[in-house]
Image (cartoon, rainbow, N blue to C red):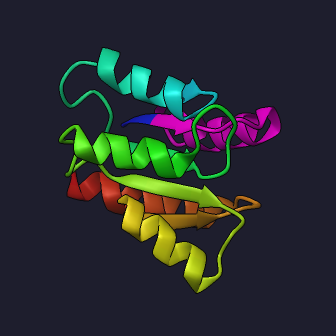
Amino acid sequence: MRLLLVEDNFLNQQIACELLRAEGAVVTVANDGAEGLACVAQSSPGGFNAILMDMQMPVMDGYEATRRLRAQGYSSLPILALTAHVLEAERSECRAAGIDDFIAKPIDFDELIVTVARYCRRA
């Protein structure tokens, strides 16, 4: 399983990478939405099974990065929001941008693995 983690916080990057790699995933890290877009563009077709997208980042946030990916035709690529914002209004904004599902911060190991596995099986 190849995953793209788009996250600006170094500690969150380390935690997510360790958890995912312990389950056998190959994880590429981007520090903001612009880097995430570049990683997707440089990957081979079908290069990532899913993207884990922080929503609040400098340079380009997760909302804009997700909208751009969807506009570029990545409609079937699962994009999962990593967010501490779990209110329904914020979830609605994420869905409107094209997010498929949510993983709450702080990251819960079981939720992370179950959610990623569910979407990667679909892909």
- Residue 99 visible in the snapshot: no
- Closer to the camera in the image, 100 or 47: 100
**Which residue is drawn at the image coordinates 52% and 23% (left, top)?**
35
**x, y percentage for residue 121?**
26, 56
* Relative vertical location of residue 83 with respect to residue 73 in this rendering, above or below: below
**Which residue is drawn at the image coordinates 33% and 52% (left, top)?**
78
- Number of marks in the image? 0
**87 on left or right of 5:** right
**21 on left or right of 9:** left
**Which residue is drawn at the image coordinates 40% and 60% (left, top)?**
97
Is 22 inside the magenta-drawn segment? Answer: yes
**Which residue is drawn at the image coordinates 60% and 52% (left, top)?**
55
* Relative vertical location of residue 83 with respect to residue 6 in this rendering, above or below: below
- Residue 42 visible in the snapshot: yes
**71 on left or right of 100:** left
Q: Name the residue furthest top.
A: 42
**x, y percentage for residue 110?**
61, 65
**21 on left or right of 38:** right
**x, y percentage for residue 56?**
67, 50
Determine which quarter of the picture holds residue 90: bottom right
User: Which quarter of the image is occupied by the N terminus?
Assistant: top left
Q: Name the residue furthest bottom.
A: 88
**x, y percentage for residue 22?**
59, 38
- Closer to the camera in the image, 97 or 30: 97
Is 20 inside the magenta-drawn segment? Answer: yes
Q: State the extent of the magenta-drawn residues as a range.
A: 4-27
